[in-house]
Image: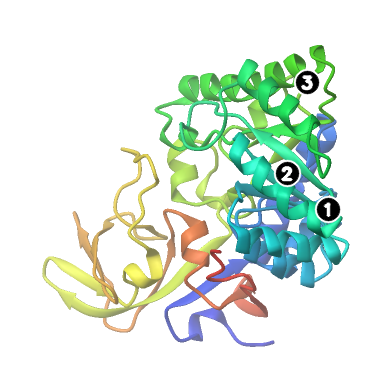
């Protein structure tokens, strides 16, 4: 391909290939140096090609948020999959059984008694057994049993179910995205590791082996992944990074592999308008909000601009000093949240330097069931 990316129509999702590869190597190197396994979360990129790269660089398997993502990845030959989401509906359990029937080494999150009973009842009829991982709450207060005795009680309950076996304990410190500084980030990471390791140790004291102790969250994995007793890390956003990660101090802008190419469609004395609105950039400043994230994306090369508001197809950027952009000029925007923005596009346009080098599908785009 000899096309220059500046000649592309807009909006277009650009993926800088050298930066992507560098980010994947950093995740892999961390895991090797700290003797933990790497199981990256593919909900960030939803791409078979990127997942393959992660596996080629040493990942032992992948993590998905939803069953549909797992089905897409399994159809591409990825067989070691953790579905890090509570599954209890009959329709979804039937899809679990279908994946098991195809030889997928599937793990599913559990965090309550009723759920494991429903899994057991359906699996009895199928003859399949399922590995379940107990999710513990490490401060996000979303899903998960409380660490310690509650985790032990659930693990004991699994022991009495013929079609289930406990394979691991895991957590997600998603509240790290709201950390105000490095000190708070380190506290969250320490609590994340403690919740998993203490729960696993409590289970093993009760005679229940816990082979996997897994932590996630891009902002914390390089801290919690060093704690003794942790055996696995599950970063997702670290494959791309974004403005939220920059705001947290976890990455530099140079580490951000994903950007949106947009055009100027309106020039006014106090603002410019871009052809990237909420259906492109998403109305996202992070789930927990950060004072350091201003506007709805960072316009590279134009620090004077703040994307102040979005409508569906328009991004309105204001400026606090002179702005020389003109009609049809193009800009690159680092999104606030790469995961949601990637899900808005059908493909990645891969670039190296000034040139387009490939196009990859966002294979699991829109998969949310």
- Which dot marks residue 346? none
Residue at which label 1 appears: 57
**Label 1: how many Cα within 10 Å (few below 14, some 14–19, many 20+):** some
For the residues labelled 3 and 2, the Cα–Cα distance comes to 19 Å
Relative to 227, say whether 284 is above or below. below
The structure residue drawn at horizontal position 68% and vertical position 34%, both measured from the top left corner, is 134
For the residues labelled 2 and 1, the Cα–Cα distance comes to 9 Å
Looking at the rendered image, the quarter that the C terminus falls into is: bottom right
Residue at which label 3 appears: 229
Q: How is the image coloured?
A: rainbow
Across and down, in percent, residue 120 comes to 73, 46
Relative to 291, say whether 14 is above or below. below
Across and down, in percent, residue 314 comes to 26, 74
Residue furthest top as drawn: 205
Identify the secondary structure beneath mark 1. loop
Observer-nearest of 175 and 129: 129
- Mark 2 or mark 1: name the one nearer the start of the chain: 2
Q: Can the viewer see residue 46 in this picture? A: no
Q: Would residue 358 appear left or right of 344 to someone viewing this image?
A: right
Identify the secondary structure beneath mark 2. helix
Across and down, in percent, residue 86 comes to 59, 46
Residue at which label 2 appears: 27
- Mark 1 or mark 3: name the one nearer the start of the chain: 1
Q: Which of the two marks, 3 or 2, is nearer to us in this view?
A: 3
- Mark 3 or mark 2: name the one nearer the start of the chain: 2
């Amino acid at each position: 391909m000899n096309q220059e990316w500046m000649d592309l129509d807009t909006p277009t999702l650009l993926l800088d290939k050298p930066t992507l590869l560098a980010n994947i190597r950093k995740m892999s190197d961390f895991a090797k140096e700290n003797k933990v396994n790497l199981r990256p979360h593919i909900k960030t990129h939803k791409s078979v090609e990127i997942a393959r790269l992660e596996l080629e660089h040493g990942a032992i398997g992948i993590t998905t948020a939803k069953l549909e993502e797992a089905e897409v990845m399994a159809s591409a030959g990825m067989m070691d999959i953790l579905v890090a989401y509570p599954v209890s509906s009959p329709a979804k359990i039937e899809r679990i059984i279908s994946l098991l029937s195809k030889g997928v080494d599937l793990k599913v999150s559990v965090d309550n008694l009723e759920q494991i009973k429903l899994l057991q009842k359906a699996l009895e009829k199928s003859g399949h057994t399922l590995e379940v991982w107990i999710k513990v709450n490490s401060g996000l207060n979303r899903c998960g049993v409380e660490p310690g005795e509650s985790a032990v009680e659930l693990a004991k309950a699994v022991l009495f179910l013929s079609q289930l076996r406990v394979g691991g304990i895991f957590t997600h410190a998603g509240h790290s995205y709201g950390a105000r500084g490095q000190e708070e980030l380190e506290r969250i990471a320490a609590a994340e590791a403690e919740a998993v390791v203490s729960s696993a140790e409590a289970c093993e004291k009760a005679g229940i082996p816990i082979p996997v102790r897994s932590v996630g969250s891009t902002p914390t994995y390089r801290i919690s992944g060093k704690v003794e007793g942790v055996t696995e890390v599950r970063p997702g956003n670290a494959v791309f990074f974004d403005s939220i990660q920059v705001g947290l101090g976890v990455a530099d802008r140079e580490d951000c592999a994903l950007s949106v190419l947009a055009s100027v469609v309106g020039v006014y004395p106090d603002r410019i308008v871009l052809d990237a609105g909420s259906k492109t950039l998403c109305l996202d400043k992070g789930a927990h909000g950060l004072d350091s994230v201003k506007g709805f994306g960072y316009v590279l090369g134009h620090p004077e601009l703040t994307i102040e508001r979005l409508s569906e197809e328009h991004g309105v950027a204001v400026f606090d000093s002179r702005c020389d952009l003109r009609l049809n000029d193009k800009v690159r925007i680092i999104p606030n949240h790469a995961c949601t923005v990637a899900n808005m596009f059908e493909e990645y346009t891969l670039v190296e330097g000034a040139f387009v080098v490939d196009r990859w599908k966002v294979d699991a785009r829109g998969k949310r069931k």
